[in-house]
Image (cartoon, rainbow, N blue to C red):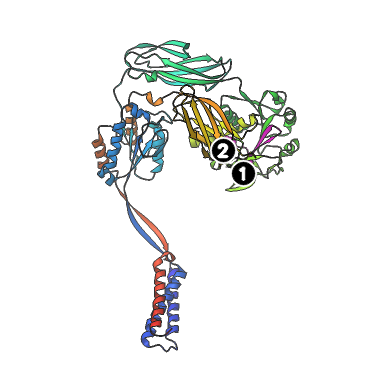
Amino acid sequence: MTAQTVLYISIAGVIAFALALYMYAYKTKYSIGHRWLFGALRFFTLFALFLLLINPKFKSETFIIEKPNLTVLVDNSASIKVLNQDIAASEWVENLKEDKSLSDKFDVSFYAFGKDIAELDTLSFSETQTNIHKALAATEELFKNTIAPTVLLTDGNQTFGNDYEFASRKETHPIYPIIFGDTTQYVDLRVEQLNTNKYSFLKNEFPVEALLVYNGKEAVNSRFTIKQEGSVLFSEIITFSEINNTKTVTTSLPSTKVGLQRYTATIEPLSEEKNKTNNSKVFGVEVIDQATKVLLVSSIKHPDIGAIKKAIETNEQRQVALLTPEEATTVLNDYQLVILYQPDRSFASVLSEIEKLRKNTFTITGLQTDWNFLNSAQSFYSKESSNAREDVLGSLNFNYGSYALEDIGFLNFPPLQTEFGELAINVPHEVLLNQDINGFSTGSPLFASMEINGVRSAIFDGEGIWKWRANSYLKNESFEDFDTFFGKMVQYLASNKSRTRLEVHHETFYYNNNPVIVSAQYFDKSFVFDNRAQLEITVVHSETKEQHIFPLLLKNNYYEVDLNSLPQGDYNFTVSVKGEAVSRSGNFTILDFQVEQQFLNASVTKLRRVATNTGGTAYFSANFQDLKEALLNNESFVATQRSQKKVVPLIDWKYLLALIALLLSAEWLLRKYNGLV
């Protein structure tokens, strides 16, 4: 409490005393006893009211004891069950939950992980992917400011994500791996990895790269083959030894038929092998007749150009050519979409030819755009040239209806640069991204698309797109989110297909260890997205004719369903709208690849290195007591006393208000009792 506040309280006391004295001592007919009683009540009432007006602040300090956190991460992937360790893992979880000595010393929390991590509810050991790195990184971030050892129940076999061995950990976050699985080394041959394109073009060849691994001591020979419908397309004898235990085989296969082509890569198993599931892998390649050809026209050099090209060509169905305006004029008809990057007067002939050929366009503008020229060269949009710049963000319009899109964190991306001023769209259009400055919408679109007389076009008013792609990678350790966002724009703009009230999006084939996603958009008769509709998908297996019906769930501006529960096979499907005679049909294939069944042993060496690098210790599943003693006896894991200091204003003290009410009530009742009211 400051000296100034003490002075105010002293003055308040003097004033309260003077007022009470004036009311009950000056020219009053009350008896002396009544004067003292009523004067005291009035003094305390007035003094309490003045204190509320002054509202002094008091500091309070409390002490709390914080136990160290103990995080238990449980591998819920199918490999635990394949290695017959599911019962042992479940028993470990129960023992950790029921152990009173551990719960007395630690604040214990349980999480299960597969591809993602979540609080532990029940263990199914059915996850089709394992990402140990993500689980360790999530708990490291969650408990970053506390003492938090981690007990990791796993076989150590990771199928997805960054290498967990190199996950950074603080000294206060040691890892104690509990190793589940057979440590005996068996003779084994396996197809460790298979790399190929997802798409190929008719009458071309596509590369196949197979990584083959041998575990054993004797030198062996085996035949590696790639077959399609029983026909051998490639065959080679491979020799392995204890030293030369890894071979990479590369070949090229011809694309002779359009559509999904299925292949099986096999390394012939040895007679003594225990696990023969990992000797084969099925893969698919979709053969298409021709690629979507995109022309990127620019008269300047800019980092955006490389980012745009890479984002588009992530999808192997698309090819991007980079040309100057002079080179582009004569070849426009060879492309389905023309991207105009920061047009200036050198684009005059290109824009004139585009108008004649009625080509779909995607215009990207920025600080080097000649708006005086662009305003005169077309009539779809305009912007007054100001020669001033501003930084803008993009906020997603969830009512955008031309195609389905998720929010990939646009407002968290670095700002783009654009010329100051309002972008006016002069034709019917839809806005996907609005310009946003310091959390406020400018009312000007950042990205807008339009379709006039069957010709599609769009404008993106901002340069620095490369920063968005780079930021997406830093956030997700992958370009996938940004490339999907940009690819959907290109897919929509490169197509001349007329819109229908029900649009369905799906892949030709999926692997059953990944999500099997089918999405759809439904529009009312005015082509406005309808978020009240009930969509369902009927899926029929082509051979067994078994039928499944699933609802599609609303997600932003589209509906989505994950059909990952379906077994491998060919499927026909129909998406329909309840109460409407609107439906769309298609087909897809789910290819079998059980990555979690590829393992014979626990990854003991890697888990031991993780424990050593973080200051922990690795244990086998039979050593519960050893782990318990190590945790209880480690003097680094101690409870800490933490103080909490709070500044509390007097006006928040409810007892003072109650006291004022009590004083006033007492004074009134006493005066009433003595007949003075």
What is the quadrant of the C terminus in the image?
bottom left
Q: Nearer the viewer, residue 611 or 273?
A: 273
Callout 1 amino acid: Gln
* Nearest to N terminus: mark 2 or mark 1: 1
Q: Is residue 588 above or below residue 28?
A: above
Q: Is residue 532 above or below residue 281?
A: below
Q: Which residue is the site of mark 2?
A: 579
**Principal secondary structure, stretch drawn in magenta:** strand
Q: Position of residue 526 (x, y in %)?
A: 65, 40
Q: Secondary structure at mark 2?
A: loop
Callout 2 amino acid: Gly
> Residue 209: within the magenta?
no
Question: What residue do we see at 63% from left, 44% from top?
Answer: 390
- On residue 435, the disc is 1
Q: CA distance from mark 2 to mark 1?
A: 38 Å
Residue 403 sits in quarter: top right
Asked if residue 622 can be seen in this view, the reply is: yes
Q: Secondary structure at mark 1?
A: strand
Q: Residues within 10 Å of mark 1 (few under 14, many from 20)?
A: many
Q: Nearer the viewer, residue 546 or 358?
A: 546
Residue 49 sits in quarter: bottom left
The stretch in magenta equals 446-468
- Total marks placed: 2
Does 124 sit left or right of 370 as displayed? left
Q: Is residue 594 above or below residue 456?
A: above
Q: Nearer the viewer, residue 363 or 256?
A: 256
Q: Residues within 10 Å of mark 2 (few under 14, many from 20)?
A: few
Q: Position of residue 87 (x, y in %)?
A: 29, 32
Asked if residue 341 can be seen in this view, the reply is: no
